[in-house]
Amino acid sequence: MKKILLATSALVATAGVAAADVDVSGTARMGLVYTSNPVGAAKKVQFENRVRIWFNASGETDGGLGWGAKVRIQRNNQGGGAVNNNAVWISGGWGKLTFGDVDSGDKAIVGQIAGVGYTGLGDLNEVVYKADNPAAALYEYSAGGFKAALSSSAPTNNTSYGIGLGYEADNWSIAIGYGDDSFFQEVTVKGSVTFGDTTLTAVYQDDDFWADDYAGLSVEHSFGATDVTAFYADFHGTDRFGIGASYDMGGGATLAGGVARNDAGTGTTVADLGIKFSF
Amino acid sequence: MKKILLATSALVATAGVAAADVDVSGTARMGLVYTSNPVGAAKKVQFENRVRIWFNASGETDGGLGWGAKVRIQRNNQGGGAVNNNAVWISGGWGKLTFGDVDSGDKAIVGQIAGVGYTGLGDLNEVVYKADNPAAALYEYSAGGFKAALSSSAPTNNTSYGIGLGYEADNWSIAIGYGDDSFFQEVTVKGSVTFGDTTLTAVYQDDDFWADDYAGLSVEHSFGATDVTAFYADFHGTDRFGIGASYDMGGGATLAGGVARNDAGTGTTVADLGIKFSF
Amino acid sequence: MKKILLATSALVATAGVAAADVDVSGTARMGLVYTSNPVGAAKKVQFENRVRIWFNASGETDGGLGWGAKVRIQRNNQGGGAVNNNAVWISGGWGKLTFGDVDSGDKAIVGQIAGVGYTGLGDLNEVVYKADNPAAALYEYSAGGFKAALSSSAPTNNTSYGIGLGYEADNWSIAIGYGDDSFFQEVTVKGSVTFGDTTLTAVYQDDDFWADDYAGLSVEHSFGATDVTAFYADFHGTDRFGIGASYDMGGGATLAGGVARNDAGTGTTVADLGIKFSF
């Protein structure tokens, strides 16, 4: 849960200065991870943990322009401390413009099929968006169920860019995206449909860097506090698949685990079981 | 705006323990930056953003000695995450003594002529203080309009040190500083005068490392929520100049931009336009 | 003092979501440190400072399982910024299980004799626990004055592990620990006794990597707000000893200093004097 410092900032508000709200929130996780092909002398089963703390600020100008900023600290296991994932944005009825660690326009709208495991298990479910990593600016607009986004790596020509368009109804959605990293181009489409407590999601990508396309399908089913998820992806000619479940323990804690397989080379099986916390 | 956790800490104050206040505050910015001479394959125009979060604590001993500590996290664009700018201090009627990332004594008192741009545009307006980077301890004292500061890189001999003396009246100020990095010495002076909504500031530095001296002049004019600034500096024989403006949008946001030129070599022109946020 | 955001989070609690408390707390210090054998061109006496900010979150599941997470930012002097010391845990009547930057089981229970100085002066008082650095998981249990802990570097065989057992009465305590880094094994024991305002603590370690054992003794005496500490350690054949004092200034500040000597090689004497802050 986010802790918004409204009460405290109101107490010390300087006359004539509008207070910008600050949230301090975070996520944490702990559990066991398994891989059938550990690197070097690493063991097949490892203890794993991670803590992330988010700092979010937002405000509004006298003219009604919304703005916000965020940055994160994180550390994994016994290493990997970092300050990362910063972004600054302005927003209004015309949409939202964000600079920083942003998704590409196609990724922001189209996204991924569902993944499994309390760690994500290497994101084997995911398709790669070429325009994502260099994306530095993202414009987003939504009206009703319609959503659109456009990203760019730089404000000049010969840049990476991505564009996405989507529509969400109550129990189905469709989206299409185009990405260009100035060397290769790709088109990604997604469709999802929900009937009752079950959601099917499919993603397809045609990228001219790869000989084969990507196609992925996930199914999610929830009953009470439990969610079960399975996915299959043909990752440009390589089979990847997984199954997992999660249980909402209440109080910000979720028990989750999964197993997934990547058939690349001799094949690698990964699995995890742990608890995720949100605060 | 700073959010001081007075109310919350009071709620959980342990009997007999004096509460130290903690502030969480920050700054952010987003905009476009231009350079006529980009490095390598970089583009002339770039998206730019930065988020900084400050943590400040302060307290007072039973004997009335004030103390404080601060540290910052920041991240620029899609990289450069850091934990930096820490300082710890004690203070009282005798002044303030700070250890950590401090200014040199001459820089702390004399400072700089005004700069331009929402990013500062490479600080082309600034003179270099030799004793600044290695400064590890700073003593400051003020009484009425009189201010003095002394810095040192280490508490022993053969160290870098800087000293500054200044006086501020309602609409004018003067300051002089001396810096020694144990190799070269420099004297820096500043004068400023304000008439109505206009402020003129001049800085002059004689440093025996350079054949030529530094001389800089800035003029700042404000009308309503808008400030306009221009500067010219003879940076030890090289012309540097710039002009910029800023507009207070309210709610912690300031729209700012500028253009500046460094005549070194074939010359470089830089410019920016963006929004700065304070919270 | 820790600032718990109870009031603020209660104000914005989303219906149906249990609030996880977040603490923001920290420590800072500033002072002078001396070494008789500085490295390279470094000076014998230096300014020193450090700021650490802790982020702690905790909660409880609907089923009554306690959980928590923590991470820290810190920076020393004019460098060394880091995000470190993360840990995530679950707890209940059965004990506490922590993953992350944990102590080894023997270190967690047995610990160290008392050290001196506001910086710890290189921890010359301390014995080394072989299973500590690679420890990734720690289980702790206590009942009455009885305490036990078990650590492991990985959940499989051929790992480092440590185990500790201790008992604490009102004015005495005993503890024993065993550590194994899969190459060498060690047994460490500690006993302490308090009579009036004086505490004696002794630690002994037999480690088959070293030809000689470790034996250490510390004495701490407090009168009013002042504590005086002295220690002597035979560090596997090398004499190490020190003496120091600290004075509680109130308001979260403690004045402390010490001097210690390591007889290794030609011998090194270290000393410090400074103020520590807690908030």
Image: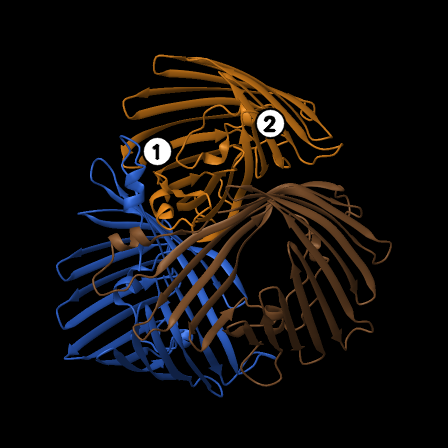
Chain colours: A brown, B blue, C orange
Q: Using the image, name the chain to which the residue with label 1 belongs.
A: C
Q: Quadrant of the C terminus of chain B?
A: bottom left
Residue C191 percent coordinates (x, y): 51, 15
Label at residue A18: none
Query: Which residue reaches farthest right?
Result: A266
User: Does the rendering let one see residue C263?
Assistant: yes
Q: Is residue B263 above or below residue B112?
A: below
- Of helix, strand and loop, which one carries label 1? strand
* Horizontal relation, residue A163 to residue A184: left or right: left
3D distance between C-alphas at marks 2 and 1: 30 Å
Residue at 46% in and 79% down: B33
Residue C270 % position (x, y): 44, 35
When the figure is inspected, residue A101 is found, relative to residue A63, above or below; the finding is above
Q: Which residue is mark 2?
A: C105
Q: Nearer the viewer, residue A88 or A215?
A: A215
Q: Amino acid at mark 2?
A: Gly
Give the residue drawn at x 20%, y 75%: B192
C77 or A5, which lies in front? Answer: A5
Q: Are marks 2 and 1 in contact (CB under 8 Å)?
A: no
Judging from the image, mark 2 belongs to the subunit labelled C
Tell me if mark 2 has few (under 14), some (14-19) or many (20+) residues whose alpha carbon lies within 10 angstroms of its own: many
Q: Label 1 sits on what residue type? A: Ala
- Direction from residue C43 to residue A145 in the image, left or right: right
Circle 2: element type: helix
Give the mark nearer the N terminus: 2 vs 1: 2
Residues A266 and B259: in front is A266
Residue that label 1 marks: C256
Q: For residue A65, which quarter of the picture?
A: bottom left
Residue A8 drawn above or below residue B202:
above
In the rendering, at what x and y percent does residue C126 appear? 53, 28
Q: Position of residue B204 (x, y in %)?
A: 28, 75
Left of B107 or right of it: where is B144?
left
